Image: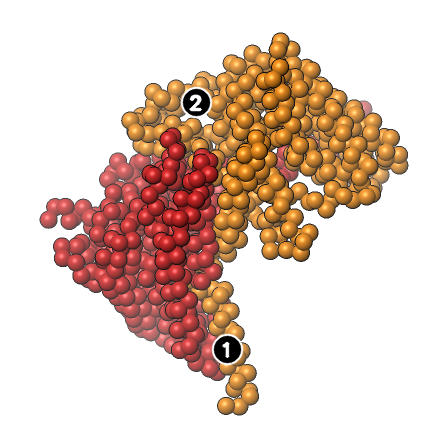
Chain colours: A orange, B red
Amino acid sequence: MRISDCLLKAKYLVVILISLIFFPGAQGHEDSMKPLLLALFILLPAAKLAGWLVERWQQPAVLGELLAGVFLGNLGLVGLHALDYLKTDPGLEILSGLGVILLLFEVGLNSSLADLLKVGLSSFMVATIGVVLPFGLGWLVSSFLLLEHSLYAHAFIGATLCATSVGITARVLQDIDKIRTREAKIILGAAVIDDVLGLIVLAIISGMIIGSSTGTGVTAGSIVWLVTKVAIFLAGSLVLGLFFVPRLMRQVAKAKSKGMLFTFALAFCFLLSYLATLIGLAAIVGAFAAGLILEGVPFQELLHEDERSPEEMLHPLSTFLVPLFFLHMGIKIELASLFRVEVIGLALALTLVAIIGKLACGLGAMERGVNRLSIGLGMVPRGEVGLIFAGVGLTLNVGGEPVLDEAAFAAILVMVMVTTLITPPLLQWGFGRRKRI
Amino acid sequence: MRISDCLLKAKYLVVILISLIFFPGAQGHEDSMKPLLLALFILLPAAKLAGWLVERWQQPAVLGELLAGVFLGNLGLVGLHALDYLKTDPGLEILSGLGVILLLFEVGLNSSLADLLKVGLSSFMVATIGVVLPFGLGWLVSSFLLLEHSLYAHAFIGATLCATSVGITARVLQDIDKIRTREAKIILGAAVIDDVLGLIVLAIISGMIIGSSTGTGVTAGSIVWLVTKVAIFLAGSLVLGLFFVPRLMRQVAKAKSKGMLFTFALAFCFLLSYLATLIGLAAIVGAFAAGLILEGVPFQELLHEDERSPEEMLHPLSTFLVPLFFLHMGIKIELASLFRVEVIGLALALTLVAIIGKLACGLGAMERGVNRLSIGLGMVPRGEVGLIFAGVGLTLNVGGEPVLDEAAFAAILVMVMVTTLITPPLLQWGFGRRKRI
């Protein structure tokens, strides 16, 4: 055999092997599934085991899931990059997004609108203080530490400290079995109002910034329109939902088809989540509202003999998807960015005022004997909402420069990560403290 | 007010409105979620209602889901393009991919390996006839109708007729409550063997084609290696699984953490699905194997008092995700391509021999009194596996020309769509016929 034959043979074998690896069978269309399948195989047991482990140390399971995520997401620090794709895998992104929506839907199904309205004024006070105080403190910190930045930058940094991300808190309250307490209701109500207020603050400030470059100011009219739009969505979906949804569900139940009620309940959750994002609110606000509305439907009367209620059917779904959300949150935390010298001062100061501002808002609760410390702690986590605000800041320009620079963005990132990670143990401690009194 | 002021004002309002629509609140990171949420809101009730409707006409629900998909996916024909994004939405792609994996996992959990092995020889015969006959008939049709095409094109078209896509059949058998019959076991076993044979056929033919351009032939060694690899995967996962998985599950149950068994069962399903794709098999073959292995685990002994078995926990997941797979399959069917004059002859001929070839394979079943017609019908649907084969054909070249041209690809597409759509009613009829005898 000549050498050229050998080379040809070798080349051919390589091609065959590559073809066997890359396209036979049903592989082609499963290209997007493959990394996801591997991710699910790794992440599901990791989340469950980590949750179980921290529970043995009397911590909420969600802390374990976050830490497992931080671990898996930062293996790059010791040279292992095989799992780096988890940070950006679109399948995981989508499943974790569904996870947090279903979590808030589940929480809504376990809350009663009447109970929420009963503590409505407290929720409103908590939310308002929790937006005004962090905003002011953030502005102050920024204007002391970032002397060369514009007024708009200070305002923008203040705004990023406003928005509470209620996913973590809702999950901790579930984990430690406090989701039906008065404190939980005040926090949940406040989180919805907080999201609305945050939206208004962001609209005003970005309006001012856009106005500054186009030479106009923010109009009162546009803000009123925003508030009206949000009010119409929230009130409208509640009123229409409470009137219309029980009737619809009764009709649906008449089909006597198994799983029909569950399917329509899910579809309703996805509808309100979608409408919430259309209006500019977080999808989870819509999911929570959908849960609240369906809580009032007497499913027990509508089910067939051996059919399970939508709430029971939802449980396996959330068992599958919710841990993926928190694991994914942990995976996105970059430990390296926590220790960058050039931003550490600003990061620490922002984190501190972010915590103080929200802790103080617990004082807004007006009921007697309510655990104000825990309410404040429950409002601490900023989750990704703050990051989205900061992301908007990177895209807005004042005098040709972006409002936020990369260092300010990194500091906000640290603030978000720290408030996310400290909430589970602190909240557990806050509620535990009360027992002993 | 001057005109320029008015214009400025108007421009500013436009900017504010755009900014309100596009970036306030939590919208940024939910960009990929938004179309999916809308899709889920539309598709979930559509699938359920369509399934319910066709069930009233004594048809399997999956037919309704497919037809609802065809309807929603072809609204473009009457000028409505708002839902065109469903054909390519990555979120829907991923959820429907998970759906069919969970369907075959569920089917595996309801099958027993011992029963499958009992009819193993029949399965093998059915699968072999069902690969050889369509392959030969496809070759014949192609060589009569495509005179100007190469030998390789005929072989390739023959190969695209081989692979059965068992998702549809498994779902129909579930719908009409025949999943535990002997016929079902023969079909399921044959589908696994069929996938392996299809993989080998594709490897041989694409090997020959690549060889023809590099001047070498396909080596027996590479084919033996492929068969060995697949055999190791199937036998290895079964043997190791049957030995190792019950022990693992017992350990897992000791943690006494709710949902732990379910999580590990899911993770095992995703692991085998992933490994199957690595080896070149369809993910659903791995999922089916995982279900078969877990079927042997005595979960009832391992559960806590009020914990549900993994199988029961799986049911809501499949209620949510499985219809999305069939709806999505329907959405991808382009009615317009069914009526293209230039391909209609080839398309009809291929569809005909595709059906005849698989119908005949039912004769391979050797048990007495078994419904051979239904077995043949159960092997008819080609699903997307045939399309993937055809897709490979578009990428392979012989003498600078692709093996398959666009018209041949379109004809194969028609064959896949027709065999998919006719299976549910025919299979229902096939099983019904038997009752009357």
Residue A299 shown left or right of residue A147 in the figure: left
Q: Are marks 2 and 1 in contact (CB under 8 Å)?
A: no
**For residue A12, which numbered disc appears in the image?**
1
Assign a secondary structure to mark 2.
helix
| Disc on the earlier residue, 2 or 1 | 1
Q: Is A68 placed above or below B199 here?
A: above
View extreme (right): residue: A148
Apparent side of residue B157 relative to residue B179 in the rendered image (left or right): right
> Does A435 sit above or below residue A58?
above
Q: Callout 1: few (<14), some (14-19), or many (20+) C-alpha neighbours within 10 Å?
A: many
Query: How far apart are labels 2 and 1 at the CA level?
Result: 64 Å
Q: What residue lies at 81% left-to-right and 28% top-to-bottom?
A: A139
The residue nearer to you, when weighing A264 against B9, is A264
The residue that appears at 43% across and 39% down in the rendered structure is: B254
Can residue B78 be seen in this snapshot?
Answer: no
Nearest to the observer: residue A345 or residue A149: A345
- Reading the image, the residue beneath label 2 is A245
| Tag 2: amino acid | Val
The percent position of residue A286, horizontal first and vertical second, equals 54, 28
As drawn, A103 above or below A33: above
Using a 10 Å C-alpha cutoff, classify the residue at mark 2 as few (fewer than 14 neighbours), some (14 to 19) or many (20 or more).
many
Residue reaching furthest to the top:
A368
Please give the chain letter of the residue carrying mark 1: A
Q: Is residue B356 above or below residue A138?
A: below
Of labels 2 and 1, the one closer to you? 1
Image mark 2: chain: A
At 62% from the left and 15% from the top, the residue drawn is A437
**Identity, as a three-letter code, of the amino acid under mark 1:** Tyr
Percent position (x, y) of residue B14? Answer: 70, 33
Image quadrant where one finds the N terminus of chain B: top right
Residue B333: x %, y % from top left: 40, 51
